[in-house]
Image (cartoon, coloured by chain):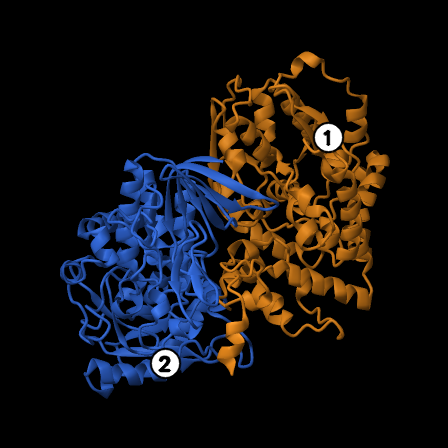
Amino acid sequence: MKADIAVVGSGLAALVATRTLQQAGRTPVLIWPGLSSLYFTYATVDVLGYADDTTAQPVEQPEAGVAQFIADHPEHPYAIAGLDALRSGTDVLTEWLREAGFKWQGSLSRNLLLPTAIGTPKPCCLVPDSMAAGDLGRDEPIVFCGFSGYEDFVPELAASNLTRAWGRGDRWVRALRLALPGFEPGRLFTSIDLARSFENDAFRREVASSLRAVLDDSTVRIGMPAVVGLTHDSDVHARFESEIGHPVFEIPTLPPSVLGLRLFDRLRKHIQETGVEMIWAAPAHDAELSDGRCRRIHLKSAGRDQPIEARSYILALEDTVDGAMRAGVHNVVDPFFHQVLAQHALPTERTDESLFKPQPFASIGYRVTNRQQPTASDGTTLAANVFVAGGAIAGYDPVGTKSRGGLAIATGYRAAKEAMAA
Amino acid sequence: MITDEIETYSDTVEEAAPDEACTKCTACNTVCPVARNTEIFRGPKYLGPESERYRDPLEAAVTAGLDLCSGCKLCEVTCPSQVTIQEYIRRAQNKGAQEKGRTLRDWVLGHTRLLSRFGSMTAPLANFGNRNPLVRLVMEKVIGVHRKRPLPRYQWLTFERWFKRKRAPTPTVFRERGKEKRTVAYFSACWVNFNERRLGEMVVHVLERNGVAVTVPKQECCGIPAVVNSNTDLARKYGMENVKSLSALPPDVDIVASSTSCGLMLKHDYDHLLEIPGAAAVGARVYDICEYLWMLHEAGELSEDFEQVQTRVLYHAPCHLKSHGIGYPAMRLLRLIPGVVVEEVDEGCCGISGTYGVKVEKYDLSMKIGSRLFEAVKAAGSDSVLADCETCRMQVEHGAGARSAHPLEIVARAYGYR
């Protein structure tokens, strides 16, 4: 199949790249390797939460923070993509969210500090309306509300951790649990089941009235696991808030994140309905190269390999899960150019024994030029019309710095601009 | 020592994804249309790879809940690790049926070709019966086919008989393509043969119009109705017949199918699920009809002297089309035709999933799954919806009260076919 520009990926980097191309009047094809990382991550857009892996002091102004970060780390993917790409890419995304009917808050000038499901404050840049009331800069006391039988959110844990971290004393943070109609003890259920139930008016009103009955303080806000509606974003949340009469904020839970699902489902649908073709279920591999350019990449379609012949290509991938790279015992290899991205005597060298320390495997990725083109180990460009975006770029580990979203936006936007010029 | 063990392994990477490749990410459960619409279904993750770890060939199969899987394959489309979730479910279901015996309904719905042949032979009577409330009540009680589900109308003149009688096109309609012209073997499938001959006529017309010679090879049911009704054994039997007949075609003949799910069986499931010898070579030659026409377009061989067709239509992409991994060739093709405005309604599964939504205990669920699509169709204010899959078309007509056709209908019209 022939295409103008082929974008491989399904996460934020791929979506921002595709949207940027579409807005510029190009006709990208989006090749989907399977479900997006947006389903599994926190579902806010984090640009820069911490200046490095060791500091506990959150970044207050993400844009200024990234500028400083680029100055300190000139080899980092953020430095390659550039601050302008972050700014313009964020504009593309926020405008798109608005057009797709989302209500989001936040800007590059200020991070919000929101409590996580275990009650730690987390710096976030762009957030859905339904999470915004969790901002720890606000003054209302917080009541964490969990549900009996739903173990993905433990309100007591969140409350005890936040009490310590927020430093406002015991009375400011409390925990309670509600029994939900129809969710008896012993029933196996997930956040998806709960989210679907919250779309049901009768169910939601019953929850609201039993919650109102146990609240004795009119000034509190409620923190709840993000299950307030499966698909209709802030609609259900806004109704629930008015039914309770208190501000309610959602807290992302363990995967699958309902917030991520809402975001990804809507953006994917919107981009398809505005004319971008998506190829589902066809993992991409094998780039055919000649004269320093990629002529075709191959898709594993049903029955046979399908070549895609495009003017340029954006590989907006992340890791071994989405097919950006494949890990053998000793070597990590990329499936497009068959370059060895990392070599280890033992696979255990890729991991640190402490789960909470930076993991070496997270930084493995494609070496790129200053235009995000993939290079061989000696630095020569492999294909002048291929651009890498997102977590697959080498030297990048979003976990410690909380910068996954911003980096996806910046590299996705830059890749789109380069792909149009190539 | 564990490190010594690791050292002895080679550095190859496994191509096939075993159940251990499942990372428990739950992505499949979030997209499963059944799990999204009922809490009684635990979702593909639990019934597929998770249960698979406990399945033992020597122990009796545990089949509770497996029948709720509609077989749409969106779980496999979604899985970032390419785990063959459906195959685990279908094999376990088949094993359970082998052990416990099959129900009358499983037998009937698995043998749709036999049923259709009978329906076609007795067309007026069968069609009358299928629309008679009393007959339908008896059918519901005896076989478990929901009385409200419209059943397909049978045609007395089958496609295969029509094709045999059709006069051969004069040699001048075939353009020369280098030295040899293209020839396709059309896998018309049961639907076109017994229910919608017109679609087959259009396929032949459009291909011949483009200088492609059409043959209709000997064929059996593709086997998908048997696969989803706990009988992969029967599906394999059908599949072996088809692979035998299609393997015998000259090597330069491409195989074209106009039914999304039948095409997917030929391309993929014969080899992967049913493990039929020789199926991979056949599958590599199979094209969906719109995929094939798009390929002609890209090769500069599609005749594009289309007549203007003033129409605004909606397009619904069938779940199984997504599994083909070819994008939406029908939409690309329709956008070549002057006057056609085509908009995608992306509301996911229509809910019918072949014979799933026909069953008495699944009908309501099937309509609930499709309700988002029905509402979107009604809201879009268009009364025609294009879909490549015949049961999607049945469901959209029933649920949204819209007219529905195969995208080829518009292409044929643009070529002057009436």
- Towards the viewer: B391 or A15: A15
Q: Against A232, is A252 above or below?
A: below
Label 2 element class: helix
Across and down, in percent, residue B82 comes to: 54, 58
The residue under label 2 is: A155
Determine which residue is flagged by label 1: B197
Q: Nearer the viewer, mark 2 or mark 1?
A: 1
Task: Give percent across and percent down for residue B189.
Answer: 73, 38
Compared to B166, does A64 lie above or below?
A: below
Above or below: residue A296 compared with residue A66: above
Q: Tell me the colour chain B is drawn in.
A: orange
Of all chains, the one bearing label 2 is A
- Residue in the picture at 76% in, 18% down: B168
User: Are the residues at dot 2 and dot 1 in contact (C-beta closer than 8 Å)?
Assistant: no
Badge 2 and badge 1 in a common chain: no
Whether residue B147 is visible, yes or no, is no
Residue that appears at 49% across and 36% down: A1
Amino acid at circle 2: Pro
Q: Residues within 10 Å of mark 2 (few under 14, many from 20)?
A: many
Dot 1 amino acid type: Arg
Residue B34 lies left or right of residue B120; in this view the side is left
Alpha carbon distance from label 2 to label 1: 62 Å
Q: Which chain is blue?
A: A
Task: Please state, as top left, top right, bottom left or bottom right, where the C terminus of chain A lies in the image.
Answer: top left
**Residue A208 visible in the picture:** yes
Chain on which label 1 sits: B
